[in-house]
Image (cartoon, coloured by chain):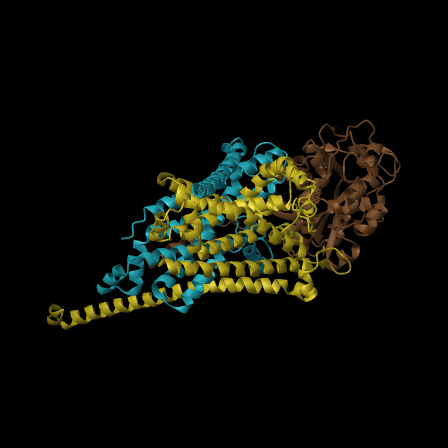
Amino acid sequence: MNLNTFMRAACVAAVATIATAPARAADISGAGATFPYPIYSKWADAYKKETGAGLNYQSIGSGAGIKQIQARTVTFGATDAPLPVEKLRKDGLVQWPQVMGGIVPVVNIEGVKPGELVLDGATLADIFLGKIARWNDPAIVKLNAGVKLPDVAIAVVRRSDGSGTTFNFTDYLSKASDEWKAKVGSNTTVEWPVGVGAKGNDGVAGNVGQTRNSIGYVEYAYAKQNRMTHVDMINRAGKRVAPTLAAFQAAAANADWVNAPGYYLILSDQPGEASWPMTAATFILMYADPADRALSAEALKFFDWAFRNGDKAAEELDYIPMPANVKDMIRKTWVADIKNS
Amino acid sequence: MPALYRARRRRNGVAMSLCTAAAAIGVAWLLVILATLLWNGLGGLDLAVFTQMTPPPNVRGGGLLNAIAGSLMLTVIGVGIGAPIGLFAGTYMAEYGRYEKLTTVTRFINDILLSAPSIIVGLFIYGAVVVPMHGFSGLAGALALAVIVIPVVVRTTENMLLLVPQQLREAATGLGLPRALVVQKVAYRAARTGLLTGLLLAVARVSGETAPLLFTALSNQFWSLDLAREIANLPVTINNFINSPDPNWKRLAWAGALIITFAVLALNIAARAVGSRSAVK
Amino acid sequence: MSDLTLAAPTANEAAIGARSAALSRLRTNDRLFFWATRLSAWIVLLILGGVIVSLFIGAWPAIRAFGVDFLLVQRWAPNAQPEPILGGLGPIYGTLVSSLIAMAIAVPVGLGVAVFLTEICPRKLRQPISTAIELLAGIPSIIYGMWGFFVLGPFLAEHFQPAVIAAFEPIPVLNQIFKGPASNLSLFNAALVLAIMILPFITSISRDVFMTVPPVLKEAAYGVGCTTWEVVRNVVIPYTRVGVIGGVMLALGRALGETMAVTFVIGNSFKIQASIFAPSTTISAAIASEFAEASDLHQSALILLGLLLFVLTFAVLAVARLMLMRIERKAGN
């Protein structure tokens, strides 16, 4: 075809594309932690059925979620590693806990069933430090009389991306082991002494499922939904606990949200006989003065809906909903801190 | 003497069997990979894959409709931007500037861009488009694909146009045709099967690219054809789904992988078939 | 024309007017077309310039912060206080070593296939087998990653790696390179996947250059009684040496930049370890894994890694292209 026809066709195509591109739909965009992704996506599905508004949540990890909201490329960010108040003030962000859950170690050892293996904080730290390298190490055997542990190397799986789950996990390990605290510390990414890196909670779960004689750490919904072999823990009170909704709730009951500025609270290693040692809250970050107030209001409508109607769905996946008084506190924070909410 | 002959023949036999084994290994790898794809992907392929949206984790059913639509859109727009630029650049190099320095340099640079890591293209578009636009978008993804399409089309266009005999052009000019029309009506027409081959190869190349889309178009859970926001696409969706332990997501990821691979292979074979019929007299 | 000059003057002027209008329109079209094509050629150069400039701008904070140390320090701690400590030695090592191992596997196999196709293969099978090998190049790299993660990785971890580890255990230096534990995700696994990916490039270019050998040279060798292998070794390969090296370097350029296939199977560890069965990372895998969440200095360091990768692949591909240009000229193209 000659140049004229070609140019004409190109113009028509361009106009057609621009004309058919719909006006920005009321799609709330958010990005962040993989920790709450199972419950957020369940809520989003139900919310879309009820109201028609969509929630596009990119489950890319807490580190990426914080970065996206700081760069204003999404309406809200989600992170299990809360930002301290100074940082919130500096960036003009508002933060609140949306739901709580538990982190569990998962293993893939032939013949070991879910809940059969038990570890304590110090042993777990030593495994992730590389000091305990084989499954039949005396330290593990001591805690697990009667469990058949093979004489093979432990394949450690940890996170490769910036993760709030890692933040809470390493926070617990730092409390349980001085050596961990000194050598590695606690953060969204740390310099892991051993192990292969997987992306996201789902990546760790997938890797552990795929690799024999491996151990990893995931949010409990991932272990439950994929029928993985979870590990019981010995908590601060010296008691063995299984990762159940009751154990998470026992840990969460200790949380003093009223006195936490910016809702900054880490729930690892809580006291109590029935407390699960690796409980964590997951937070939402939004702008106090959003660029697009309408979108911001839409997002808050969703979170309010989730507070009102989402508890049952959360408990089905073994997430703990926020207590009622905290929900009211959070609503007051929205009105006070977020413009035009 | 016979001992020397025998040794040489033995060496030859060993070498030739190793070469045959190498060829067998090469073909075997292809078959193993395709077999894995078919084994894992066929089971998950059903009509719903083409008619339903991507599902949330741990539910049954769902499909890849938004990802397929998004990929088609990105490919069409990416090729729509990149192919004309590549065509024109190749035309300049073969028709107007055949012996110029500009052409030699451009050809050299183009061949390097052809094999450049695609993640670098993604980084470039991130800095050039995503950051100024303050957000991920289908447009950024399409531009990243366009940057990958251009070198492929430039190369094939130039090669095909160089194959057109000069006598055709001289005859047309002798009849009084202006230069632009000589190129459009004579050279393009003579090389059209080759140009089509190049186009098919370019489409095949970008259909499977994941890295450039990772931080340009990102992905989208829902149906959206809005170029100004994130758009679902097959490679990034497969990347997200395959890493998950959810068996439904894994099934969809394999089905999507099967769709992409066979689309790409079909395009490659079509390009080859068109190219071999290319009659440039 | 004479009939026009005899016709009425008004008709003459109209015709001349129309003709000159048509001619000037054609001339404008000509000029437009010329400039459109010239501009497009410039766009190709602009793209390259744009890539280099944007990478440089993005990497500048990291260059200023770390300088040459970036190439020498292994530690990768984006969250270190007060300033992140980021050294690129880990990804650089992984990129170079995985590519070199991939070449060590792919070059002999690729050349072997090319020799097979040109010397041994029955004429009828030549096209199908060539096509089959070239289709390997068409498979998207994410598919290679998936296959490597689900099929090749477990296979290597269960059967291949333990055998090699056991075999090398008594040997003093090599047992550090082939040390266990066997892992699904490792530098070696990534190198093997890379080898399969770059095989078609080596094969197709080698096959094409093997075909440029003048038959008279080979016939002369056969005439004095050489075996096929001796002809290949002493006639074909020396004649096509430059082209083969060009093809090998092109494949190296691809291997250095490969992202998705490697990210799936390499294990994402920034530590440099002696064993090739340990997890590692490459530049492109590191960027793909961490870019989405990186900001400020961390992001700049990743872009610096990208710049280094671009410079490296540019150099390798430039050398490859120069060599291939020489052999093309020799073949009379």
- Could you tell me if residue B72 is visible in this image? no
Nearer to me, A247 or A188: A188
Q: Is residue A4 above or below residue C198?
A: below
Give the image quarter of residue B173.
bottom left
Q: Position of residue B245 (x, y in %)?
A: 64, 36
Q: Is residue A318 above or below residue A168?
A: above
- Could you tell me if residue B22 is visible in this image? yes
Q: Position of residue A195 (x, y in %)?
A: 71, 44
Give the image quarter of residue C126.
top left
**Left or right: B121 in relation to B150:** right
Single out the residue that lies furthest toward the right: A237
Q: Position of residue B6 (x, y in %)?
A: 44, 40
- The residue positioned 53% from the left and 59% from the top of the image is C316
| Quadrant into which the N terminus of chain A falls | bottom left
Give the number of marks.
0
Q: Position of residue A111 (x, y in %)?
A: 72, 27
- Rendering colour (chain A): brown
Nearer to me, B223 or B202: B202
Nearer to me, C240 or C67: C240
- Rendering colour (chain B): cyan
**Left or right: C218 in relation to A171:** left
Rendered yellow, the chain in question is C
Nearer to me, A117 or B143: A117
**Left or right: A249 in relation to A79:** right
